[in-house]
Amino acid sequence: MLWLFGNSNELFMHLQRLKIITRQNYYFFEYFWRDIKYYNLPKLYFFHPFLAAYTKYNLPKAYFKSLCMEKFVGRIEEQQILENALGSSSPELIAVTGRRRVGKTFLIRSVYRKHIVFEFSAVHNATMPEQLAGFMKAYQQAMNSKAAYEVPASWLAAFNLLEDFLTPIIKKKKAVAFFDEFPWMHTPRSNFLKAFEHFWNSYASKHPNLTVVICGSAASWMIQNVVNNRGGLHNRLTRRLKLLPFSLKETEEYLNSRSVKLDRYQLLQLYMAMGGIPEYLKQVTRSKSAAQVIDNLFFTKQAALKKEFDNLYPALFENATRHIMVIRALASVSKGMTRKEIIDSTELNSGGWATQILNELEESGFIMSYLPYNRTSKDLVYRLSDEYSLFYIKYIEKSRATGSGTWLRISESASWKSWGGYAFEAICLKHVPQIRAALGIGSIYTEESVWRHVPGKGQPGAQIDLLLDRKDYCINVCEMKFSTGEFTVTKKYAEELAQKITVFRDVEKPRKTLFLTMITTYGVAKNQYSKGIVQSELTMDILFD
């Protein structure tokens, strides 16, 4: 049957429609598609319930185990938080938030795979009866029963059933109840949230062996109704995880675990285009260069990430149009914007809407805020930190170019250098702990900030994208430059750097030693200009530590 379908996604959707396979089994399916020729499985047999192949074809046990759980990479701190919660002597209510496709569900299933006794995943845009029917299906699976259960008429009744199911289990051992896509359960006039509040306050909070995990991509709903809840869930969360994209180190480890071997410059290019989103990185194929991967994912007719932007923000935020306006505004400038500049650019009102939108975007990891040197929170500068959104707006949205070689042609343009510089700066700002460690100041109290000075009164303007203000009376003035080889400090650029430092000294009058630190891809070429001004330099390799 495989030859009837163009790719694995088409076959998977067909099997799902026939109820032969479920969405939760997708990782099993991927491995079989990839290795079917290696184990010489007959194509027709693949169409049948495919796990039977383990018995019939005597596949290696190690292979079968690899089907059951994709190798877990990174997320060390998050794993520790979840494991500590399970070992707690108190009941735990954990909220896990994060943008779409960042790996929330996979993280929870991986850490708690031996302890999840009940898991319910809601359906987007389903009605209350449909959600309750899904709940009962999850209840039936948890009971390991084929008996037909009557669908409860309300969420209160549904949670009563869940309490009866959990009670005998948590008397004997630790157990986890996992609610995935939690916001989707709260349909209009369903009273779901009130029923869940009652479930937690009257039952779950009294059982030390019970850990309840709620997870959702709809950031605005989770923040307003769970994190900042003023009703029955106020101050009830015991732990909260905000899952962010992979770091460069985690990205390298993840691709290596999938047998994708690329050097760090190529990995950096991929990260600049799609960020550290596991689901995006899963599309990277072996034996392809970064340019080929970018072509396949963005510039072909069937490109997997070409239309992702259209779904990304509406899936996360209510009235996402305003959020997208902010994203577009920040993508149009390379040096960040203040709140006032964003409001002026987007025509948002200066009231609570602007504050809420900025908070929601920052909570979800799309933007980052920076406190300027010697300024207050009113002067916060916001930058777009989501690599995929920047790349989409810059190159995909209005592009007519398609086919192989498209990205290589674009990389020869002047706009590529501008984008590369901005994207590299944003990546460096995400990896400040690695920069501090490489400079040997990881143990020194350090405040990171940005700085910009508007020209006036005969004084030129200047901007510094990263200042590391240290407790030992030193400041690292960091310059970040992306290039395809060693970066050359020219006479003109050396004069610009010297002027920037002079303006900073004159305006701020810091009583500290200033060290100019260059962070580049391949290092700084040694010449008379670099020797005279650059005190320390780092390469892209330290960002992978």
Image (cartoon, rainbow, N blue to C red):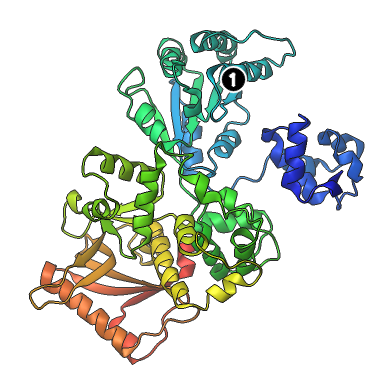
User: Residue at 30% across / 60% down in the picture?
Assistant: 336
Alpha-carbon neighbours of circle 1 within 10 Å: few (<14), some, or many (≥20)? Answer: some
The image shows residue 162, relative to residue 437, as above or below, that is: above
Instruction: Please state which of residues 343 and 42 is positioned toward the viewer in this rendering.
Output: 343
- Expressed as whole percent of the image width and height from the top left, the position of residue 329 reads 34, 56
Specify the quadrant that holds the N terminus: top right
Residue 494 figure quarter: bottom left
Residue 421 figure quarter: bottom left
User: Residue at 65% across / 46% down in the picture?
Assistant: 71
Q: Residue furthest left?
A: 457
The image shows residue 230, relative to residue 535, as above or below, that is: above
- At numbered mark 1, what does the secondary structure look like: helix, strand or loop? helix
User: Residue at 76% across / 50% down in the picture?
Assistant: 7
- Expressed as whole percent of the image width and height from the top left, the position of residue 480 reads 37, 71
Amino acid type of disc 1?
Glu
On the rendered structure, is 224 left or right of 375? right
Disc 1: which residue: 130
On the rendered structure, is 110 left or right of 204? right
- Expressed as whole percent of the image width and height from the top left, the position of residue 410 reads 53, 73
* One can see residue 531 in this view: no
Instruction: Please state which of residues 329 and 64 is positioned toward the viewer in this rendering.
Output: 329
Instruction: Please state which of residues 467 and 119 is positioned toward the viewer in this rendering.
Output: 119
On the rendered structure, is 277 left or right of 404? left
Residue 257 figure quarter: bottom right
* One can see residue 351 in this view: yes
- Expressed as whole percent of the image width and height from the top left, the position of residue 261 reads 65, 64
User: Residue at 48% across / 22% down in the picture?
Assistant: 187
